[in-house]
Amino acid sequence: MSGEKWINIRRDLHQIPELGFKEVKTQKYLLEYISNLPQENLTVETWKTGIFVRVRGKGGKETIGYRADIDGLPLTEETGYSFASKHHGHMHACGHDFHMTIALGALSKLSVSPAENDVVFLFQPAEEGPGGAEPMLQSKVMERFRPDKIFALHIAPELPVGTVATKPGLLFANTSELFIDFTGKGGHAAFPHQTHDMVVAASYFITQIQQIVSRRVDPLDSAVISIGKITGGTVQNIIAQDARAEGTIRTLSPESMQRVKSEIEKIAKGTEISQECEVKIDYGSNYYQVYNHAELVQNFRKLVSETDLQFQEASMAMTGEDFGYMLKDIPGFMFWLGVDSEAGLHQSTLKPDERAIEKGISIVEKTLRHL
């Protein structure tokens, strides 16, 4: 199949981004494509809006898995593409259109010429939220399709086309969303003594949690607490009864994540007492660290050396990826695929270089055959 065909598939998928567990059109498109492949070696099952595909091998003793995430982001596209998103307010701004296309490309080749081992493709919903990897991993379907090894890729806008990057050990951080609601007593701005001001309470709380990283986390470890949004009150002359803060936590170890959350909860209790209010915390979606299996990364590096791709040692990043849950349970790894875009991930102007698609298909197919 020509490179132009893969580009057209990517563009089809780019136009129909859907949020987590709502990927109905996306699932339909993928299933229709898969149904037109040679079926004699394929077993296909759906799970929610995701898909499992097994390609029966020639008699090998292992099953090799490949995960491709399929959801989009709640973001209004500003690429100027002629094939821009048809779903207003939604965009494939994290490269999942690339991920799916590469998976379909590798699947197409293996369906015609199977590998020695069985290969399982997991088209996973809800990577961006609320998190599809963990429930997919725990599903009854996974019991039937469970691989012995698993890997995945993610596009890297900052890397040139033809470059892949990864590392053994920790690649991506543990992450958690953070939502805090403050409820007090509102009233007239002229009578503050009769109120419990939630703008003040939220401000106090946010200031206090900044000390967690500097005074409660080992300086040889790393953690981030970022509050990206604050809302509260109604108009300028009414003291706010309610306020809300939204942010994220990122750490390089599961233990540090628990420590940070414990400290946040202590400060919340103190805020309730000192500001005479109620504080509720919701951690939203939580992602486990992406920890790469050293031997499999070494095997992958050797496979890359046999191609025209360039291998680069990756650095750890505070980004989050729910593929970490699969790696917690199954030996494997994730790697970056260079796509050379001026705009970065989760930006409305992200424009990955489509020449990277064939590069991705080639290395994924080779890895599935020889990992």
Image: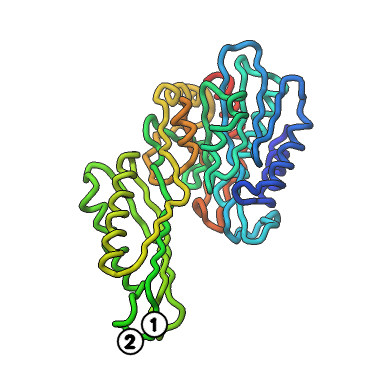
Q: Position of residue 144 (x, y in %)?
A: 62, 23
Q: Position of residue 118 (x, y in %)?
A: 62, 19
Residue 338 % position (x, y) = 51, 41
At label 2, which amino acid type do we have?
Phe
Residue matched to label 2: 191
Residue type beneath disc 1: Gly
What residue is shown with label 1?
Answer: 187
Give the residue furthest to the right.
36
- Crowding around mark 1 (Cα neighbors within 10 Å: few <14, some 14 to 19, many 20+) is some
Helix, strand, or loop for circle 1? strand
Q: Are marks 1 and 2 in contact (CB under 8 Å)?
A: yes
Up-down: is 143 above or below 336? above
The quarter in which the N terminus is drawn is top right
Q: Is residue 245 above or below residue 20?
A: below
For image coordinates 41% across by 40% down, the residue present is 172
**Residue at left offset 64%, top offset 60%:** 80
